[in-house]
Image (cartoon, rainbow, N blue to C red):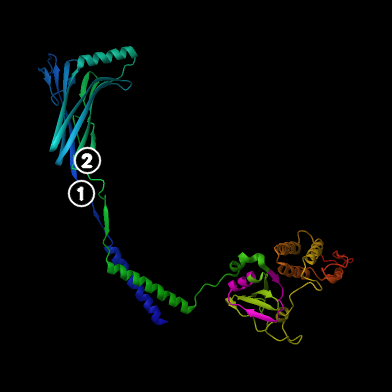
Amino acid sequence: MRPVAIALVVFVFLAAFAGYWVAATDHTTTTAPTPLFSYGETGAFTYVAHLKNNTLYNSTYLTPGNGTLFSAITDWVNVSFTFHLTTNRSVNATSVATIAVLLQSPAWSKPLFSETVRTNVVDGTFATLGAVYDLNVTNVTGLAATIEKETGYVPSAYSVVISPSVRSSIGLGENATGATFVPTLTLNFTANQIVPSRLTSSESAAFTPPGDPSLTNRPNVSVIAFLLLFGAVGGAGAMAYLLYDSRGERPAPDLSTMTRPYQEAIVDARAPPSAPTLVPVRAWEDIVKAADTLGSPIIRVVRPSVAGPEAPTTTSFYVVSGSTAFVFVHSPDSPGGTPPPPDSPARAEAPAPGSLSAAVRDWHERYPRIPGVDTSTLDAFVLWSDRISDRLRWFRPTSSIRQDSEELLLRAIGLAQRGRLDSAWVILGQLYTRLGPWETVGKPPSTGPAGGSASGRPGTPRPAKGTGPKP
């Protein structure tokens, strides 16, 4: 098998090379959709403050960035708002701005002004709209003082909020999108000052029609690399299987795992059944199939090795059908199943007494059966199950022989209730042998056709004095 091993190594190296090739070329090309158009929105505030005569600025006008507004010397603040919409393509657009002015504190809010303005653009790239609000500082401070007096709540600061909400609809051909833009200017009245917030804000976005894919990932894997990887992996798998199969390195089946699902159908015996014809099978599944087909129990016989007590034992499983017995032999040296030994009672002529070892003589013992009983009727089974149950009462409840025997008796009764009377009698025969010798407690009564006493009732033996089994 040296060529197979060499081929396996070659295929493994080819698979590694092909895998590296595939990994090196397996990248994706991402194609982003092209927007139909892009647009930007800008909102700008500016103001001109009208001041009282003062010695601070030597002027009655003040614009952003030229000084601090003090409420004590400011009469008016004329606020102007300008909105611009720009696009990279000629579009049709409509923009509507709702300007709201509020006087508010952390605990209350008072509307001062509201106005709506709009603008349109047809097949153009630029739209603009504007609004103006004149803030009377004296009126604002007086209104705030009145609210404070009425509510008893004196905030640390209050503000005038000018909030235009601009909603635009932008279309190109049959495609259109909506946009909302809310710039806000806050004039904070605090510590006798009027402090404006940010005067300019802007946003931008792009519009892609809904039908376009968002992202298209295109694999760029070399076809040759993929085919080489597929072939190398397949070849390595085939060579590994051939190498594994040639060496016979299959895991041996575990006997306990193999028989665990069928414990209810397995009956332990000290010797194999006496059947003229013995048919060996090669697999445990075959003996299970035979038991299911015939409705018979699986008889398990553990046979010690003739090599000595330290040698591993061989376990045989039988299924009996009339004069034929199917057998599966499980040995630690050959767990897959072996034919029965040549000295099996079904394969060898009966040897002369005294010419066999103790292990072989035990193998030739007949499978235990209750003598003189008609096993074809359910009445006989009921009578003998009662008889064995009475016999078990002579043992202590905690003794292992009573517990094991009661379990077997219950199993036999269960088989009889399901119509498997032959299997149930096999277990009763095992119990009959296990609980013997019966001669020490009186022989079974003479049985009629039902397997009971002549009167139709089981003959319940009573132990002679000092002769019963010791617990």
Could you say which is closer to the camera, residue 116 or residue 346?
A: 116
Say what secondary structure mark 2 lies in. strand
Quarter of the image with the N terminus in it: bottom left
Residue segment shown in magenta: 267-292
Is residue 232 depicted above or below 357 in this figure? above
Could you say which is closer to the camera, residue 224 or residue 88?
A: 88
Residue of label 1? 34
Residue of label 2? 176
Whether residue 47 can be seen here: yes
Q: Nearer the viewer, mark 2 or mark 1?
A: 2
Say what secondary structure mark 1 lies in. loop
Residue shown at the point (23%, 45%) measured from the top left: 209
Q: Amino acid at mark 2?
A: Ala
Marks 2/1: CA distance? 16 Å
| Disc 1 crowd, CA 10 A, few/some/many (<14, 14-19, 20+) | few
Q: Amino acid at mark 1?
A: Thr
Whether residue 306 can be seen here: no
Counting the numbered discs, the total is 2
Could you say which is closer to the camera, residue 438 or residue 422?
A: 422
Is residue 131 depicted above or below 252 in this figure? above
Residue shown at the point (63%, 71%) measured from the top left: 293
Q: Position of residue 197 (x, y in %)?
A: 21, 27
